[in-house]
Image: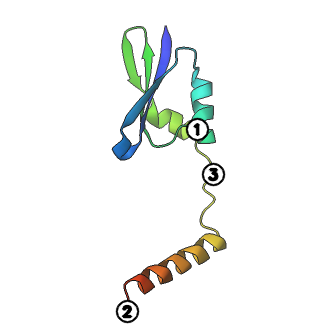
Amino acid sequence: MQYFVVMIDYGRRGREAIVDPELTRREVIARVASGEYANISFIHEIEQSTVHDVTDDILAEAALPDLGVTAADLQANTFDHARDLRKHEPV
């Protein structure tokens, strides 16, 4: 029997282990690529009585191209920074 354990970290809210014996490697990769699985702590592949850490392999296979920062993001960051500076001005 072979299955995957995906550990998701929710920060202060805790962690969740997703274990589904019917999930294939391809489906795990698809869920990571789609963003359904985010904040992954680790992914283990359990095969018979052995455990393999396949986190790096699956994350590499599911990697999306880096789109970089857009002009809209830069403008939003500038507005946010200016707003934060105004919060600390004397009244």
> Residue 13 versus residue 52: which sits nearer the camera?
13
**Count of numbered tags:** 3
Q: In this image, 10 relative to 28: left or right?
A: left
Residue ID at (38%, 89%): 89
Which residue type carries mark 1? Glu
Query: How many other residues sit within 10 Å of disc 1, few (<14), some (14-19) or many (≥20)?
Result: few
- Location of residue 24 (image quadrant): top right
The answer to whether 60 appears left or right of 14 in the picture is: right
Q: Which residue is mark 1?
A: 36
Q: What residue is disc 2 on?
A: 91
Q: Secondary structure at mark 3?
A: loop
Q: CA distance from mark 1 to mark 3?
A: 17 Å
Q: Residues within 10 Å of mark 2 (few under 14, many from 20)?
A: few
Residue type of the residue flagged with mark 3: Pro
Residue drawn at the location 55% of the way across and 79% of the way down: 79
- Lateral position of residue 54 relative to residue 14, left or right: right
Residue 19 x, y percent position in the rendering: 47, 21
Name the N-terminal-most of marks 2 and 1.
1
Precedes in sequence: disc 1 or disc 3: 1
Q: Residues within 10 Å of mark 3 (few under 14, many from 20)?
A: few
Q: Earlier in the sequence, mark 3 or mark 2?
A: 3
- For label 3, the residue is 65
